[in-house]
Image: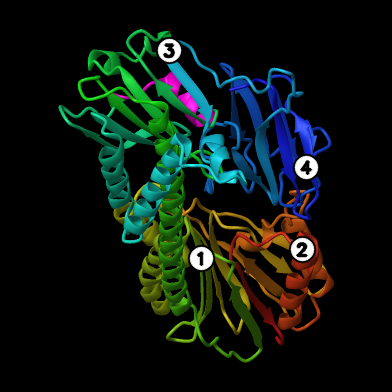
Amino acid sequence: MSNEMNLHVVTSDGAAFDRALDGESFVIGRSSKADLTVPDRSMSRMHARIFRDDGTWHIEDLGSRNGPLWGGRALERPARLGHGSVLQIGSTSVTLREAARPVSDDSRKPPTTDSHTIFRSAADLLKEPEEIRTDSVTPMGEGLRRYADRLRLLNEVNQALDRIISLEELLDLILDRAFDHLRPEEAAIYLRTDDGGYACAASRSVGKADPDMLFSKNLMEQVVEGGQAALVLDAQTDERFHEAMSLLDAGVRSLVAAPLLDPDGALGLIVLGSRLTIRQFEEEDMELLASLASVAAMRIRNVHLAEEAEERRRLEQEVALAREIQVSLLPDKLPEVDGWEIKAGNIPSRGVSGDFFKVELRHDESEIVLMLSDVSGKGIGASLLTASLEALCAGPVHDGVLPEDIFRSVSHLLFERTPPEKYATSFIAAVEPQSGILRFCNAGHNPGLLMRANGDSEWLESTGMPLGILPEGEFTAGERTIGEGDTLVLYTDGITEPENPEEEEYGEERLREVCLKYRTEPLGEIVSAIEKDLYDFVRGVPFLDDRTLVLIRRTSG
């Protein structure tokens, strides 16, 4: 691949420009300190880095909130880029392109060739021959015949592929047509993997099959990264293949290869091999294979899109089921207690969190119990863990067990029954309606906010570690008295951790300010004020977690 590369940038508003890749490292982000600054609110300050390693360009995520997408997938590790690679960084599209070169007098020289190997642009091979574009009536020449053969192959492949429903069937049929029309002794299809490498997805041989027999790093880079078809006349004497030991040991001499070109970057390549016992490949074979590869790439992409659509459908079903489980655990009615006002609710995000709350009057009506929990993870797993937590707490809460004893028992059971990465934070508040005595226990949860009628406030901090971390957890209880006009506010991190476009968190102090400002208003008004302030703060940044609030106020002594 050429070292002279440009970035073609298209922003979310349609503005487009090119930027040369300078040096060995190039950072893209929203910050003015980035090498390429893009005013994209969905982009992190320092979003991604494009860097050169061993002569090729790579991309890596710099810990962004919305990681770069390559080939429609999020990057988990650095990936190698080539000409035509398309990246989605925030709402901005970035395409890697070879820098334009001035046209010289020798620009029409024949394609790269030596005594052993010929490389030609795959895109050029797909163009119709000059004979077809002329207005003169001429007998069918060799070029026209080859083009007609190509059309017949493409029509045949397209008709056959209409019946394909899986990637495995698709690749098998492509190999069928390659053997029918090009008569190789070996054939392999290599597809790009999630880590940016390539793996053999399908292979066939008239003799002993070896998926890696036709693999050549040099050929792979030139064909895939350069978008070129290749005709190798004698691999045994071509220096490019001296390191391809499996190919040489198998006696493969003649090769023909073509890239699987996709608008979002090359998907891989098809390579055919012959030991010359049947034939030596010719330029006509390279043209036919390039045509077959173009159709194959389109069909492979369609299969991938169908698989992605099915995965999205499956995930949507999972989210819907998880939401059903989560909603079923939330109380549909809050207890009514003379002298007290209670308000609680959950606002779902686009996904499903493990938020859970319950407000219950103990069976002897001696205490109002408020419990708020947030389990680790998302989706079905989080919902099931939430259901387990609710089941473990239901009996003790109803029967009058002390908050600290509830947590000791639940923590032990969660540790025994769940994997180490599964845990929950939780806050229990038990309030005596007559005296206003509050007994609370905080298992690694966000601190509760106790607001006094006179405007004073305090945070009720953690009194123990999260549930399920250790087999035997130590939990202590705190005690306060809630007077007339005092309000206790419990919440999950979906309230305090949303970020604005500058990646600043909403935070506990901002929450305290809003609560104190509206402390004399009905609890519903406080909840509405918090929501409005959150929306004003994030300025369009999506909420990534559920927002759950539980509030209780003593209205009379």
Residue 313 locus on image (x, y percent): 44, 66
Q: Earlier in the sequence, mark 1 or mark 2?
A: 1
Q: Which residue matches tag 4?
A: 30
Q: Nearer the viewer, mark 4 or mark 3?
A: 3
The magenta region covers: 213-225
Q: What residue lies at 68% left-to-right and 58% top-to-bottom?
A: 498
**Mark carried by residue 512:** 2
Principal secondary structure, stretch drawn in magenta: helix
**Mark carried by residue 240:** 3
Crowding around mark 2 (Cα neighbors within 10 Å: few <14, some 14 to 19, many 20+) is some
Q: Amino acid at mark 1?
A: Val
Q: CA distance from mark 1 to mark 2?
A: 26 Å
Q: Which residue matches tag 1?
A: 352
Q: Nearer the viewer, mark 4 or mark 1?
A: 4
**Considering the numbered disc 2 on the image, is that residue within a helix, a strand or a loop?**
helix
Q: Amino acid at mark 4?
A: Arg
Q: Relative to 56, is 365 above or below? A: below
Q: Earlier in the sequence, mark 2 or mark 4?
A: 4
Left or right: residue 202 compared with residue 40: left
Q: Amino acid at mark 3?
A: Arg
* Quadrant of res 458: bottom right
Crowding around mark 4 (Cα neighbors within 10 Å: few <14, some 14 to 19, many 20+) is many
Q: Earlier in the sequence, mark 3 or mark 2?
A: 3
Residue 169 locus on image (x, y percent): 28, 51
* Quadrant of res 317: bottom left
**Considering the numbered disc 1 on the image, is that residue within a helix, a strand or a loop?**
loop
